Amino acid sequence: MPLHIGIVACSAEGAALCYRTICMEGAQMMGRHDHPEVSMHTHSLAEYMKRVDRADWMGVAELMLSSAHKLARIGADFLICPDNTIHQAFAYVEPRSALPWLHIVDVVADCAVERGFRRLGLTGTRSLVESRVYPEKLQVRGVECVRANAIEREAINRIILDELVNGVFTVDAVAYFQRVFERMKGEGCDAVILGCTEIPLIMSDANSPLPTLDSTRLLARAALHRAAGVTLGSGL
């Protein structure tokens, strides 16, 4: 039997895309209408944002662990969290978790190495981009990280929190990301990390001047492969 996937969710749009990817791509791997058992729990995004805004990562960890304990009680075998920003709390979560986790940044970084990328642009919430979450894990793999600049961070943060998490997708937002990605390309980036799980709802290889690393779908695919006991291929 495939393993039971537990999703510790934060924002609705990113979690929904992750869940849907597991179910839809599960059928491609396992057969018509088939996918592993999946359970999801989330606290209010407002509760997370109160803690993120004051950099209370221990508080964020408590919310994540609350979800993790609930998922463990209903039979999940391992956990994922389709939210990059709150992985800043992961060091407080993992030692106290009853279940193992797949770390979204490890999944993205491993994919970057497999695909031969050496210099990555990073986009996401202001909090994530200003953190060491991605640079640290990329550095140990010999991959450089170019962050969105201060002006871009503010604009992207607004797009994410005012628009994308609320299901608002505009041509202006797409155009802004394209300009940021083009600048990163000019700085020598060979790919860009969609480091917010809602960004893939408007950006992809189809409309980006750089290859994209879709953190949401990469995490979902890694979970699907782990649940099904299938070895990951190049690029997940």
Image (cartoon, rainbow, N blue to C red):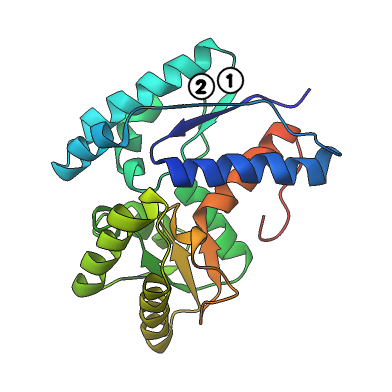
Q: In which quarter of the view is residue 111 placed? A: bottom right
Amino acid beneath label 2: Leu
The location of residue 184, given as percent across then percent down, is 38, 81
Question: Does 178 sit left or right of 234 as displayed?
Answer: left
Q: Mark 1 points at which residue?
A: 76
The location of residue 216, given as percent across then percent down, is 52, 51
Residue 77 in sight from this viewpoint: yes
Foreground pick, 210 / 131: 210
The location of residue 65, given as percent across then percent down, is 37, 23
Foreground pick, 199 / 169: 169
Residue 96 in sight from this viewpoint: no
Q: Name the residue under label 2.
A: 99
* Residue at screen point 86% across, 39% down: 31
* Residue at screen point 65% across, 41% down: 22
Question: Does 83 sit left or right of 72 as displayed?
Answer: left
Which residue appears farthest toward the bottom when viewing the image? Answer: 186
- The quarter of the rendered structure image containing the C terminus is bottom right
Amino acid beneath label 1: Ala
Helix, strand or loop for disc 1: loop
* Residue at screen point 38% across, 37% down: 10
Is there a contact, CB below 8 Å, between mark 2 and mark 1?
A: yes
Q: In which quarter of the view is residue 27 placed? A: top right
Question: Does 179 sit left or right of 116 as displayed?
Answer: left
Question: Does 75 sit left or right of 46 as displayed?
Answer: right
Number of the label disc, if any, that sits on residue 7: none
67 vs 151: above or below: above
Mark 2 vs mark 1, CA separation in Å: 8 Å
Crowd around label 1: few <14 · some 14–19 · many ≥20 (10 Å): many
Helix, strand or loop for disc 2: loop
* Residue at screen point 40% across, 89% down: 186
- The quarter of the rendered structure image containing the N terminus is top right
Which residue appears farthest toward the top when viewing the image? Answer: 73
